[in-house]
Structures are given as structure tokens and as C-alpha cells.
Amino acid sequence: MNVNDYIQSKYLGVNDLKGKEPVVTIARVAEEDMRDGQTKLAIVINNHPKGILLNKTNTRSIADLYGDETDAWIGKAALVTPPTDHL
């Protein structure tokens, strides 16, 4: 048994990447309410059922590339890399 088969998430995670660093296309940006009361941004990507929950660093990196207005991110490419603490 693999524990990852029992830990499901609607967000793309390090186990979903399987060592790959795909370039994805941003289909839309959504606000996600967290259990702790915070609201975070998530990107929905083309051709994948899971979205990517953005932390502050990821949000700023995309904004530095494509601007502060998230509508401008639609159709743009993003490289997905695993967090370094999971390598």
C-alpha cells in the first residue's frame, strides 16, 4: 500500500509531479478559502483536473512575470517545480 493513495487533494502536489517539472498553461485564477480563515490564490491549469495553490512566493513570481492583475495571467505559461524541502 502507498499512503499517497489515501491522501487526496484537489491541488497538485509533489507526489503528482513524479519528479517532472512541467510547463503548464494558466486557464484561470481562483480565490480559495483555507480552513484557517486565510484566502489564497490558486491557478487552474489546462488539461489537468487539479489546480495549484499559490503561496506568497509563487504569487509574487507569477506577478513579476505577468503583472499584478490576475486576468493577465490567463493563457500564460508557468513552470511547476517541486519544493526544495521535498527533494
Image: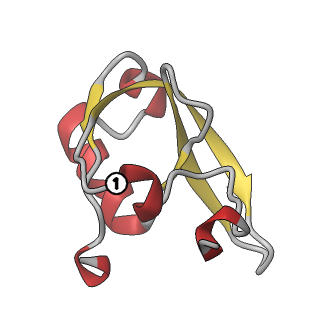
Residue plotted at (48% across, 59% down): 13
Left or right of 26 on screen, residue 51: right
In front of the other: 85 or 32? 85
In front of the other: 38 or 80? 80
Instruction: Bin the neighbour count of mark 1 within 10 Å (Cα to Cα): few under 14, some 14-19, many 20 and up.
Output: few
Residue type (three-letter) at the residue carrying disc 1? Lys
Q: Residue 24 location, x and y as percent? A: 33, 30
Name the image colouring: secondary structure
Q: How many marks?
A: 1
Quarter of the image where the N terminus is located = bottom right
Residue plotted at (59% across, 40% down): 50
Residue to which mark 1 is pinned: 18
Q: Residue 82 location, x and y as percent? A: 29, 62
Question: Farthest residue in the front direction?
Answer: 1
Q: Residue 28 location, x and y as percent? A: 54, 26
Where residue 44 sits, quadrant-wise, is top right
Quarter of the image where the C terminus is located = bottom left
Residue plotted at (44% across, 65% down): 55
Left or right of 65 on screen, residue 38: right
Q: Residue 34 location, x and y as percent? A: 74, 68
Left or right of 38 on screen, residue 53: left
Q: Secondary structure at mark 1?
A: loop
User: Can you say whether 11 is above or below 56 in the image?
Assistant: above
User: Can you say whether 19 is above or below 38 in the image?
Assistant: above
In front of the other: 2 or 61? 2
Residue plotted at (68% across, 50% down): 10
In front of the other: 19 or 56? 19
